[in-house]
Amino acid sequence: MNEITKYTAVGRRKEAVARVTLLPGKGNILVNKQPYEKYFIRETDRIIIKQPLQITNNLDKYDIIANIVGGGLTGQAGALRLGIARALITSQPELKDSLRNQGFLTRDPRMKERKKYGQKGARKRFQWTKR
């Protein structure tokens, strides 16, 4: 039996988590069962998603199926980019250096700061009253 090899990876950014599956194919990208052009409205988000594929010349070699949960659209695009880069490494380990040099394997550590007790938010305080 001929098994189709599929490569999976997880990418995260801010509150967004992207579970990515890489399959040999023609370059179709599905995000939450929709074409990525329909899911990501902004052109900048679409460019971010395709960056790892363009640098490694794999734009039309793989189909990508992604499930993304949490965060906003830009955070989800960043999470998807990291997931795609990690999945590409599992399929072709020799790509690791080129992806690392471009910064596609670095997880963006910035997260929302938690709300503190006795305050209105993470940094904002309640208004001080003199009397």
Image (cartoon, rainbow, N blue to C red):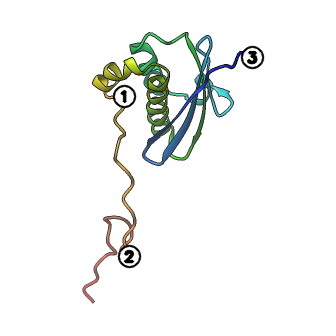
Which residue matches tag 3? 1
Helix, strand or loop under label 1? loop
Q: Is residue 115 above or below residue 6?
A: below
Disc 2 marks a residue whose amino acid type is Tyr
Q: Are marks 3 and 1 in contact (CB under 8 Å)?
A: no
Query: Callout 1 environment at 10 Å: few (<14), some (14 to 19), or many (20+)?
Result: many
Q: Which of 101 and 92 lies nearest the eye of the viewer?
A: 92
Q: Which of 111 and 60 lies nearest the eye of the viewer?
A: 60
Disc 1 marks a residue whose amino acid type is Phe
Which residue matches tag 1? 104
Q: Quadrant of the C terminus?
A: bottom left
Which residue matches tag 2? 117
Q: Horizontal and vertical percent for residue 120?
A: 39, 71
Query: Callout 3 environment at 10 Å: few (<14), some (14 to 19), or many (20+)?
Result: few
Q: Which of the two labelled residues, at mark 3 and mark 1, occupies the earlier sequence position?
A: 3
Q: Which of the two labelled residues, at mark 2 and mark 1, occupies the earlier sequence position?
A: 1
